Amino acid sequence: MSKYDVTIIGSGPGGYVAAIRCAQLGMKTAIIEKYSTLGGTCLNVGCIPSKALLDSSHHYHDAAHSFEKHGISTGKLSVDFAKMIERKTSVVSQTCDGIQFLMDKNKIDVYQGLGSFQDRNTIDIVGKDKKVTITTEKTIIATGSKPNFFPGMEPDKKRIITSTEALSLTEIPKNLIVIGGGVIGLELGSVYARLGSAVTVIEFADSIIPTMDKTMGKELQKVLKKEGFKFNFKHAVQKVENKGKKVVVTAKNKKDQEVTFEGDYCLVAVGRKPYTNGLGLENIGLKVNDKGQIETNKH
């Protein structure tokens, strides 16, 4: 049984940076990751791939709307969406390979599988083909989060999708419904709006990015309206239904009237929730609240 000074569960930006620093400080370090690649949500299905698609869609949008005023004629434009997704995948692969290189360089042992506590110093790691057990003096929990959803809007990952599926679609939606006016929904909505999708946002609050400065929301809304976004505020989604080749969203507006929206895809982007299931936290006396967050003290 391998013994470590510190073990990190989760290889996202919180986890892999912590692992590198611990190794630099002379600790024998291990990192556990349930997925086949390192880097967590950010590198695999979050910040990096979404920025790659934003970059590509921005080039297309500029060519379609800005080049002519600079005296640049491009002729008839078209989008090779499969190529765009292929580039995104390549960017992700290069970035994740970079994290693996840093683990090797700093002599950090990498375990693939789901880590769970037997007790505070013993961790079981269940992979695809085998189970191993390690002991550790200290553990850092850096398991991050996953897409959230509310009753009635459960993703089927086909037509009712989360940000993960939105980053790997095989076609550009003609009509994309986005539930949630936060950063994730607006960012991915912007990718597809630039490529020609009609984007409709349904938001429970009275503005987009409602947790941020109101002025920022107003200015961002102006920009997105120019991209063709349509906004529906103070709408409470009741249910989302996959009807085969279309999705129907039923919501109640601020007058408590039932309204429906139709699109070929619905992106559920109502925030994220902690990824703490299956860690065996009950075996080490750690409590989670009703949102799944680990309760901490002022330190």
Image: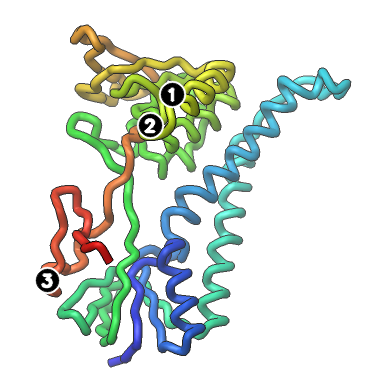
Which residue lies at the image location 28% right of the left edge and 92% below the top edge? 1
Q: Residues within 10 Å of mark 1 (few under 14, many from 20)?
A: many
Q: CA distance from mark 3 to mark 1?
A: 44 Å
Q: Does label 2 or label 1 sit earlier along the sequence?
A: 1
Q: CA distance from mark 2 to mark 1?
A: 7 Å
Write down the residue under mark 2: 267
Compared across the picture, whether 131 is left or right of 44 comes to: left
Q: What label does residue 176 carry, if any?
A: 1
Q: CA distance from mark 3 to mark 2?
A: 37 Å
Q: Amino acid at mark 1?
A: Leu
Which residue lies at the image location 49% right of the left edge and 18% below the top edge? 229
Which residue lies at the image location 21% right of the left edge and 60% below the top edge? 294
Provide residue 137's location: percent of width, then percent of height: 28, 86
Q: Quadrant of residue 232?
A: top left
Provide residue 40's location: percent of width, then percent of height: 42, 59
Which element type, helix, strand or loop, lies under badge 3? loop
Which element type, helix, strand or loop, lies under badge 2? strand
Q: Amino acid at mark 3?
A: Gly
Question: Looking at this view, is 41 or 157 the one in front?
Answer: 41
Q: Residues within 10 Å of mark 3 (few under 14, many from 20)?
A: few
Figure check: 97 above or below 66: below
Write down the residue under mark 3: 285
Q: Amino acid at mark 2?
A: Leu
Which residue lies at the image location 24% right of the left edge and 21% below the top edge? 236
Compared across the picture, whether 189 is left or right of 276 comes to: right
Which element type, helix, strand or loop, lies under badge 1? strand
Figure check: 289 above or below 231: below
Q: Are marks 2 and 1 in contact (CB under 8 Å)?
A: yes
